[in-house]
Amino acid sequence: MVARCRRIFGQRRVGHGGTLDPDATGVLLVGLGQATRLLRFLSELPKSYTGEIVLGVATSTLDAAGEVMGTWDMSAVRPTDVAAAAAGLTGEIDQVPPMVSAVKVGGRRLHELARAGVEVEREARRVTVHRFVVEPTGEPLVHRAEVDCSSGTYVRSLAADLGTALGGGAHLRALRRTAIGLFTVDEAVSLDSAGVEHVKPPADALRGRPRVVAADADTVAAIGHGKVLDRSVLGAEGDGPWAVLDGAGRLLAVYERYDDAGRVKPAVVLPVA
C-alpha cells in the first residue's frame, strides 16, 4: 500500500495509521510527506469492523486463510447462545495476539516467526471491546459480526474466543474495517481510483480533537519555531492535544501539555507551504 501510494502521489515519505490483515478490506489511513508525523495521533483511535464468524472450524491463522486445525459439530448452538457468548467478550478483556500478526516479540514480528514454524509465548494485552454484536446469516453456522473496539484489538482472536466460549472453535472471514475514529468507509476511496484530488489537508488528521487558532503574527512565529507557550496564549482548554491553526484554517502544529504551570509544548510543527 505504501509503495503504491509513493508512485500515485509522487511522495517518497509515506506512512500508514494501522495495518490490515492481508485478506481484510476497508479503511486505511495514509499520511504523505510531512503529514506522516501526524499518524501518531491516528494509530490509537478506536476501530470498527464487520465480518463473518464461522462456527465449528478453527484455523492456524484464526481466519479463512489458515490451515484447518480442528472441527466441531456445533449445529446445536442457538443464536441466543452466540449472543450471550459475545456479550461475555465485551468490555475490557485480556487478549493474546495471534501468531500471525505484526506484534514484535524479541525484536521479530510474530508472523515472521510463524512462517518459520516457530511458536512463542505471547503475553495477553488489555483491550476494550465497546460493542460486539453477532447475528445469524442464512448460511448454517455462519454469523455476521459488528465490532467497535480499541486500537490493538484482534477481531480474529475475538472470533476464535467466541468459538471456544461456545464449546468448540471458530474462525473469521470477510473482515472489513468500516471506521477508524471519525474516518469512515463512506468517504474512503479505492487504491485504484486514488489521486491528488482525494488528499485531505493536514488539519483533517486532527478531526475530533480540540482546535485553537493562533491569534496574531507573533504567536504564529513562536509556534513555527516550536516554542513552549503558556496555554493562555493559545486559549487552550482541557487536556489536549490541541490542533493549532492559523487564520486560514491551515494546521501549524499540534501542541500538548508540558507542565503543571499551565505551559504547552509542540508535539509536531508543520511548515506552512
Image: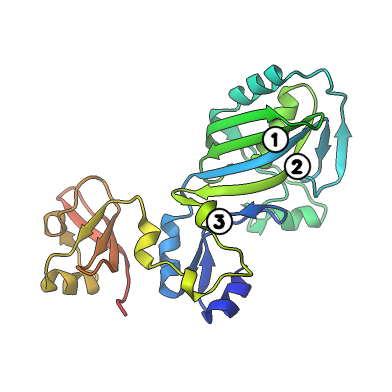
Of residue 205 and residue 41, the one placed in the foreground of this image is: 205
The part of the image, by quadrant, that contains residue 142 is top right
The amino acid marked with disc number 3 is: Gly
- Which SS class for mark 2? loop
Q: Position of residue 50 (x, y in %)?
A: 63, 41
- Which SS class for mark 1? helix
Query: From where the camera sits, is residue 226 visible?
Result: yes
Is the residue 25 above or below the residue 217 in the image? above
Q: Mark 2 and mark 3 in contact? Answer it, CB < 8 Å.
A: no
- Which SS class for mark 3? loop
Is the residue 111 above or below the residue 122 in the image? below
Q: Position of residue 140 (x, y in %)?
A: 82, 29
Q: Which residue is mark 2?
A: 62
Q: Which residue is mark 1?
A: 159
Q: Earlier in the sequence, mark 2 or mark 3?
A: 3
Q: Which residue is mark 3?
A: 18
The part of the image, by quadrant, that contains residue 161 is top right
Q: Earlier in the sequence, mark 2 or mark 1?
A: 2
Of residue 221 and residue 133, the one placed in the foreground of this image is: 133
